[in-house]
Amino acid sequence: MRIEALKIPDVKILTPQRFGDARGFFSETYSKATFAEHGLDLAFVQDNHSMSQAVGVLRGLHFQTPPFAQDKLVRVVKGRIFDVAVDIRHGSTTFGEWVGAEISADAWNQILVPVGFAHGFVTLEPDTEVIYKVTAPYAPDHDQGIAWNDPAIGIDWPLNGIEPTLSGKDTKHPALADLPPYFTV
């Protein structure tokens, strides 16, 4: 597995190997031992699967507060997304900054979004399916978010003139400046 740090080094792109033959392919997309070899000691407790029918479905920016904060390992099994992580760790040298990467079934890459980051993505192809592992179960009382279009963060979503499709919840998240300091370094 190839592991590369992004501009904010705590966020990483992971690309598992694929072994193909006439039947198709095999790939080990997660291995606790491999992760540990790279200093990633994570205990995933839940897998989630979402499907978005249209291009421009924007999910995020989400996170959970302690003690249910989540690391997320996100991969696409059909289609393509632009995935974003925003550093919301007060005291971090990259607080309020974002990194983004295209994650796709064709590239067979994944993104690791650690605790202390808000996470979101927008679909770039119809019928896109995303699977992600998390290190804490869903906890509705700890479910939070920040505005996907907060101008202070300035995420350059590749919407190409399309108005994003959002959930009702995602239209009501506060700006980062209005968020309590849930995470500190």
Image (cartoon, rainbow, N blue to C red):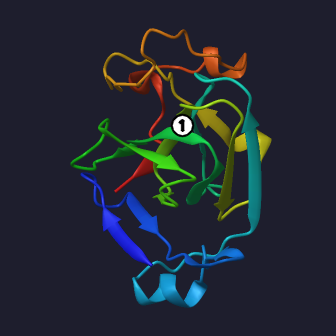
> How many numbered marks, from 0 up?
1
Q: Residue furthest front?
A: 22
Residue at the disc numbered 1: 120
| Mark 1: secondary structure | strand
Residue 149, percent from left and from top: 44, 18
Q: Position of residue 158 (x, y in %)?
A: 41, 24
Q: Is residue 124 visible?
A: yes
Quarter of the image with the N terminus is bottom left
**Is 9 left or right of 158, judged from the image as shown?**
left
Q: At 38% across and 75% down in the image, what residue appears? A: 2
Work out whether residue 104 or residue 184 is closer to the camera in this orientation and state it.
104
- Please provide percent x and percent y for residue 30: 60, 76
Task: Give, as a three-letter code, the residue at label 1.
Answer: Gly
Within the image, what quadrant is residue 6 found in? bottom left
Horizontally, residue 68 falls left or right of residue 89, namely right
Q: For label 1, count other residues whose C-alpha is less than 10 Å away and answer few (under 14), some (14-19) or many (20+).
A: many
Q: Residue at 64% of width from left, 22% of height from top?
A: 170
- Is residue 59 rendered to the left or right of residue 40? right
Q: Is residue 128 shown left or right of residue 2?
A: right
